[in-house]
Image (cartoon, rainbow, N blue to C red):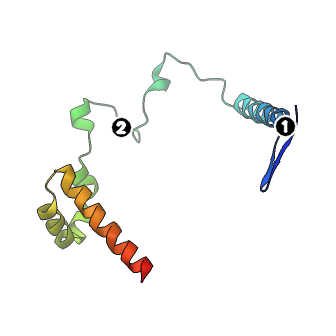
Amino acid sequence: MFTVETGSGFWNPIIWAIAIFVAFLLIYILRSFGKKEYKKDTEQIKSFLSGNPEYEKEKMHVKASNLYWGFTTSLKGLYTILRRMHTGNTSDYVLWFVIILAIFLLIEVL
């Protein structure tokens, strides 16, 4: 094996293989400090929901409208404008991207 020297460093496959081996060895050692009481097919595999029992997925689902209520309420004026602009047509978004990119390029040139 040989070392390839570049302007920003070097590449030696043996050194990289040793580094990867050492990294995996450290991960294995850190993992061995874990709790031994874990049992795979018991209640321990259930999701922790802040101590609440898990119900049907439809009842447990938190809608985005509830989750982001504070943001949508405080920025209601902006969201109403954006909803009017939203068509769902991909070509409209590409057109806006091209227009904004052209503006940035003009600003860069000037």
- Give the labeled residue for mark 1: 15
Element type at marker 2? Answer: loop
- Which numbered tag is attached to residue 28? none
Q: At x 27% / y 37%, what residue is drawn? A: 60
Badge 2 amino acid = Asn
In the orientation shown, which residue stands out farthest toward the front? Answer: 109
In the image, which is nearer the foreground, mark 2 or mark 1? Answer: 1
Q: At x 62% / y 23%, what residue is drawn? A: 37
Chain-order first, disc 2 or disc 1:
1
> Label 2 neighbourhood size at 10 Å, few (<14), some (14-19), many (20+)?
few
Q: At x 23% / y 57%, what residue is drawn? A: 93
> Label 1 neighbourhood size at 10 Å, few (<14), some (14-19), many (20+)?
few
Whole-Å distance between the Cαs marked 2 and 1?
50 Å
Residue 107 location (% of width, % of height): 39, 79
Residue 65 location (% of width, % of height): 21, 53
**On-image quarter of the N terminus:** top right
Up-down relation of residue 42 to residue 91 (above or below):
above
**On-image quarter of the C terminus:** bottom left
* Any part of residue 70 in sight: no
Up-down relation of residue 100 to residue 41 (above or below):
below
Q: At x 29% / y 61%, what residue is drawn? A: 97
Q: Quadrant of residue 96?
A: bottom left
Residue 61 location (% of width, % of height): 26, 39
In the orientation shown, which residue stands out farthest toward the bottom? Answer: 110
Q: Quadrant of residue 19?
A: top right
Element type at marker 1? Answer: helix
Pick the residue in front: 8 or 27.
8
- Give the labeled residue for mark 2: 52
Badge 1 amino acid = Ile
Residue 92 location (% of width, % of height): 19, 57
Mark 2 touching mark 1, by CB under 8 A? Answer: no
